[in-house]
Amino acid sequence: MSSSPTMLYGGKAGKRVTVRDISAAKERGERWPMVTAYDAMTARVFDEAGIPVMLVGDSAAMVVYGYDSTLPVSVDDLIPLTAAVVRGSSRAMVVADLPFGSYQSSPQQALESAARFMKEAGAHAVKLEGGRRVLPQVEALVSAGIPVMGHLGLTPQSVNVFGGYRVQGRGQSGDELMADAKALEHAGAFAVVLECVPTELAERVTSALSVPTIGIGAGPACDAQVLVWQDLMGLTPQPAKFVKKYFDLATEMDHAVRAFADEVVSGAFPTPEHSYR
Ligand SMILES: Nc1nc(=O)c2c([nH]1)NC[C@@H]1CN(c3ccc(C(=O)N[C@@H](CCC(=O)O)C(=O)O)cc3)CN21
Ligand SMILES: CC(C)C(=O)C(=O)O
Ligand SMILES: [Mg+2]
């Protein structure tokens, strides 16, 4: 289906998407896309394409900073990226991912970190990982007027507990995930990311919640889908099974930079067309 001005995806420009627009989309049964963004120029492209929500993910640790997990990045690392995404967009809601160690110790710590993303970067909402174990944090943020996105299933900040990036919520643990999802909704979360969970569980959670589920490796029943932009564009060398590659950016960039390099070496670039007199 193509977008229309009433839809969350592709809706009217100039005015930022709000949490009310997102809950209205769930009531209409409308699916919508979310992508990550980490800089102003990519944010502008996605904003102009009508992407309603952009996530400045702590996946920046891996795709921007080159670490092999999300654990090393700090609030100080992510604030400049978040500010750039806000400056590069005019319609999308910009969600800041709270990094490992910036919210776990107390509701006070969560509020201090979230407030920095709102005040210093202009973020419109924050995301944090976990269910019942972070409920006091979710409640403190919601009480302070900060929209909170939850994240359940494969929560990458717990990779060392999981022993790798593995599907979560199979068998008995599916009931635990359902309880976490309901607890997040009850605490006031406006949406919940479900990462790497079985299709059937995501379907049950999506039906049980009145706030949208955002799937990544969680099957087709979710209200929304999110991908890391470098994954969907084909820049990531070994993407997960849940990634669909919509472009081959690595190959296209390889060809372009080799063409530039060859023309520099041969003297074919620059010509008078790209020179001054
Ligand atoms: N570029 C990128 N994309 C992501 O989606 C992403 C990040 N980075 N960094 C943070 C986390 C890590 N993520 C990952 C990373 C690997 C798998 C993965 O390889 N999963 C296995 C599933 C194994 C199983 O069956 O349990 C796979 O083969 O897809 C999943 C999620 C998702 N997030
Ligand atoms: C993949 C999404 C959900 C995320 O948390 C991130 O990019 O950090
Ligand atoms: Mg994340």
Image: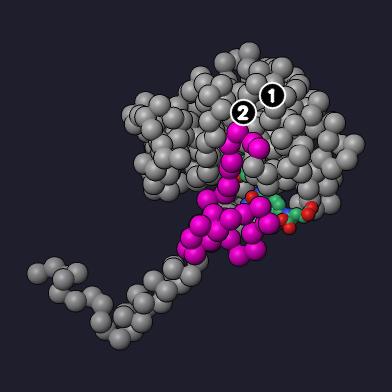
Q: Nearer the viewer, residue 257 or 250?
A: 250
Q: Where is 274 relative to 130, above or below?
A: below
Tell me residue 18's x, y (percent). Answer: 48, 23
Which residue of the protein is positioned furthest toward the right in this rendering? 172
User: Is disc 1 placed on a helix, strand or loop?
Assistant: loop
Is 219 a magenta residue? no
The answer to which of 252 and 172 lies nearer the viewer is 172
Q: Amino acid at mark 2?
A: Pro
Q: Tag count in the figure?
A: 2
Q: Kindly identify which residue carries mark 1.
A: 209
* Bounds of the magenta segment: 221-249
**Residue 121 visible from this viewpoint:** no
Per the image, the residue denoted by label 2 is: 212
Asked whether 75 or 95 is in front, the reply is: 95
Query: Which residue is found at the position 19% from the left and 69% from the top?
Result: 274
Quick check: can you spot residue 5? yes
Q: CA distance from mark 1 to mark 2?
A: 7 Å
In the image, what residue occupies the spot 66% across and 52% down?
A: 242
The amino acid on which the numbered mark 1 sits, given as a three-letter code, is Leu
Judge left or right: residue 260 versus residue 108.
left
Q: Main secondary structure of the magenta part?
A: loop
Q: Quadrant of residue 46?
A: top left
